[in-house]
Amino acid sequence: MTRYSADSRDRVREAVDMLALVSARTELRRAGVDSYFGLCPFHDERTPSFHVRPDEKHYHCFGCQMSGDPFDFVMETEGLDFRGALEALAERFGVQLETEEEDPAAASRRRRREWLLSLLARAAIFYSRYLWEADEAAPAREYLLGRGFEERTLREFRVGYAPSAWDRLRNASRRAGFSDEELLATGLAQRSRGRPGQVYDRFRRRIMFPAVDARGKVRGFGARAMGEGQQPKYLNTSEGELYRKREQLFGIDLARAPAARAGRIILVEGYTDVMALHQAGIRNAVGIMGTSLTEEQLDALERVAGVLELCLDADSAGQEAMARAARLAAGRRLELRVVALPEGSDPGELIAREGAEGLARRVGESQPFVAFAVERILAREQVRTAEGKDRALAELRPLLGEVGDGMLRDELLRRIAGRLELSERRLAALSAPQAGPPPSAPVERRAQTDTPQRSPPAVGAGEAVDQQRRLERGFLALCVAVPDAGERALSDDGLDGLLTSGLYRRAARHLRGRLGQPMADLPAGDEDLARAVAELVQRAARGRRVGPDHLEHARLLLELARLERLIRRARVEPGLDSVSLARERERVRGALHAVIARIERTV
């Protein structure tokens, strides 16, 4: 893989207009020299606590403790890794990236890849122009506009049309300096069987939907036939150097940033469903391009958001696709929810019938996948017979093993008991906890493991867990950044009560007495701890103008979160004094207001 030079990274950082970058996500107001405040783009708030220093290329939220530089901001808001963020910022701010010294073979592969990508980009422009300018494409234009798509939507998705002539794209590409071998490598052309050596356009008389990656690079095409009796109806680019159908998600380039901000992404089946949702203002939707959901696609979805909402067709194929998604998501940090559609409908048809508001309402009413799966079992089995009830119970038990104690579990048990006419004894057996860990714990429980979390937050309980981890990570990074005050904070006997993550508790114990050299004496074999401490050191190095007040602010946020947890427990555990806890919470809130006032006086 190409490695970019450190000088390139520095030049990109210097070129970034931090105010322009952040202002695209939230409105900022000036609050002094090199100081701006706005509402945090990473969590809901009413009072601005998100602070940006444009000259220092740094941001920090006093509410959720998110902080970093331009690369962090793009990674968090757009769901990219560091390399992707670097490339995105370089492209946005006009910086030419330089690579570290490569061996000739690697340099040759990189140049070829860039050349082939430029060929695909030119092809997308060729097809798009042909759709809007050619008389031959008039029926395709009428078809698309008749489906309710606006021109701006079609242009945004770079939809085009492939002419019927067998060599139009080939000839245009040759004139631009591309060879037949390169046309074959990108899947834009294929060899004739009857005339050896003859190369002709692969796509003809078809509406063209570019398959674009998360960075906006065209990798291939999906094509719908427009000719009478033309087969197959849908034709994709053949698998090759740049295009792998298993990795593609239609619309991911446009949906990535809205999905990262929302913490959730909607999955539909086809091209037109994605376009219909985006046109309706539901911008965090992607499509699986007519294939079964794959591990590679789930990897990409998980990098962007913590909640995956399945909005698939309400037929047997759609339900099977949802079941497959659940199997693939087992063990991942990804919460699955299902958007219920009327039988026989797809998202595009629903928008046409009920409007964008109708679909948005159904998305807002999505249900956890386990609730959908329970209903599916109860609807499929003949639950009026004893044999049918036994079969249903056998399938329901492992599903309920995945659901922690709470209102969702209680509601599911009531639903099952009513439908199966269970006796109290059978209901108790069904609800008994299972031995061993569940096969696919929901996000609320999985997120409490020691594995560092990187995906954007989900909502509800999952969001609370992610928020807590950010607070703990921010607190420990500040301990490293402000070592004198940090040593006092780490020596607090009550620290373990503030940290809920086992990994961050281990990190705190390791850092105690080692803030001068945080990476020293790391225990052999504990790679998770080594990665966590390295990340804390990196974040501490990025912090600018932080002091003891910032650390105290982070500690008070952890204390407030601890009290909130105890108050919730006090509602069900009579031994806890909720009145005293509420008084202590108000005291901590007062201390928080005071420390925020001190910090704001220094910015």
Image: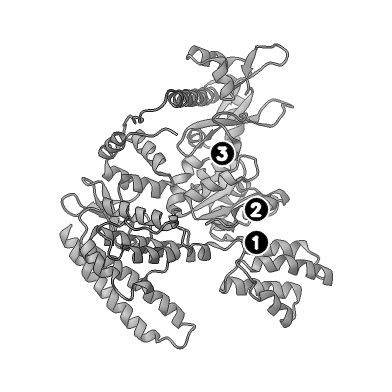
Give the quarter of the image for residue 383. bottom right
Rendered-image quadrant of the C terminus: bottom left
Spatial distance from mark 3 to mark 1, Cα to Cα?
27 Å
Identity of the amino acid at label 2? Met
Residue at mark 3: 248
Q: Position of residue 103 (x, y in %)?
A: 42, 26
Q: Position of residue 326 (x, y in %)?
A: 63, 55
Rendered-image quadrant of the N terminus: top left
Q: Are marks 1 and 2 in contact (CB under 8 Å)?
A: yes
Nearest the camera: 285 or 214? 214
Label 2 crowd bin: few (<14), some (14–19), many (20+), radius 10 Å: many
Task: Report if residue 419 is visible in the image.
Answer: yes
Residue at mark 1: 372
Q: Secondary structure at mark 1?
A: helix
Q: Which mark is residue 322?
A: 2
Up-down relation of residue 264 to residue 243 (above or below): below
Identity of the amino acid at label 3? Gln
